[in-house]
Amino acid sequence: MDDFYLYQRISEAIRREILTGRLKPGQRLPSMRQLSLQWNCTPGTVQKSYNLLAKEGLVISQAGRGTQVAGSTPKAMFQTQESLQMAHLVNRSETFLLEALTAGYALDEIQLALEMAMDRWRAPDPMVKRPASNVLRFAGSHDMALAGLARHVFGGLIADTHLQLTFIGSLGGLLAMAQGKADLCGCHLWDGQSKTYNLSFIRQHFQGEEVIVVTLAQRRLGLIVAPGNPLGIQGIADLKRAELRFVNRQAGSGTRHWLDGELEKAEIEPRLVNGYRDERLTHSDVARAVAEGQADVGLGLESAAAAYKQDFIYLTQERYDLVLDAEKAQGQAMQQFIAWLQSQAAKEFIARYIGYDTRLTGEIQT
């Protein structure tokens, strides 16, 4: 095991013992020789672990007395039970991170996996609690890049504001915002009559009200299939094949809305699609279902297919817009967010997600 990760793991193990109270103040820790035998490493690796814990104020090393737990924990870190719990959570997260790193995963892969796992928990949030004033409530369609930039921009570049994400589909997001349950929403609803995305639906929900529409990105949408496409799936017409197991998005999502239009054009009745009622709340869920063999094909984003290392059959490029109340858009946090979306940094950040086109990113319509 790499020396860097090993000494971090040793430090984390001892830190957890101290924080949970299993190691008491004044208690002597094992000698460096004992720990090196336990962890199958050199005494120098153990020394680095003890030095790190000493810098954190958790242990004290004295010549002739060895290393022992400090008499009191640092006040800045552990003044309250809440801070103790948070420290424990961080330590557990570091344990998982170090295990994943030593298993050969890259940091970007681990981060993406965590984001997709968190998306599953964001989806069913009913938004019944009134958030604090420094929280902006998002409701709408699931987007891979949005989940990433929520952490990067809010809490990072805009340090005093948190973006609370709830993925309930495009139509659900527009309705939540119209009812005052969300401060901004995300949608990608195709209107076959006007041949445009989102605008006709926005007008229906906000008649007489002024809203601002900011484009996040254009995204590649298509069929997610197993590597090598063993069943020879080519397009929407294949969904009527009885032997194929399809996995769908939920009613009200932009993806489901687009699919229904395509099925109508192809003269395929939804009841003939095996799995049409098998609904998932995010693109990640769809890709995961295909990757785990629960389905043969699903409709979703290329970025989700790539994350699960599945093949992708391109069908269309869609526009994903953010809808903001015009009055709330004048707030400092919203203004900073819009300015960031119009920057080159935003385009570079979003372009890291496979299948995203940033040529319209930051474009504003009122």
Image (cartoon, rainbow, N blue to C red):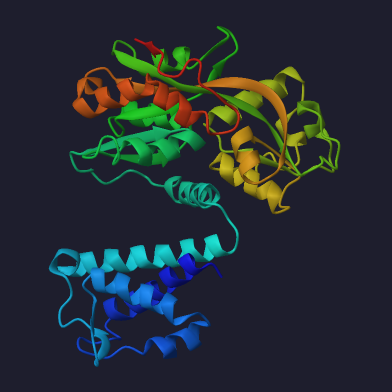
Provide residue 211's location: percent of width, then percent of height. Answer: 31, 16
Q: Residue furthest top?
A: 194
5 in relation to 66, above or below? above
The quadrant in which the C terminus is found is top left
111 in relation to 217, above or below? below
Q: In percent of the image, x 26 and y 17: which residue is there?
A: 326
Of 24 and 270, which appears nearest the observer? 24
Provide residue 319's location: percent of width, then percent of height. Answer: 52, 20
Does 121 sit left or right of 53 as displayed?
Answer: right
Q: In percent of the image, x 34 and y 65: which residue is there?
A: 89
13 in relation to 330, above or below? below
Provide residue 330's location: percent of width, then percent of height. Answer: 21, 20
Provide residue 60's location: percent of width, then percent of height. Answer: 22, 81
Q: Is residue 278 visible?
A: no
Count of residue discs: 0
Does 90 sit left or right of 109 as displayed?
Answer: left
Quadrant in which residue 207 is drawn? top left
The quadrant in which the N terminus is found is bottom right
Q: In percent of the image, x 86 and y 36: which residue is there?
A: 232
Q: Is residue 123 visible?
A: yes
Quadrant in which residue 181 is drawn? top left
Of 154 and 61, which appears nearest the observer? 61
Q: In percent of the image, x 21 and y 72: which residue is there?
A: 57
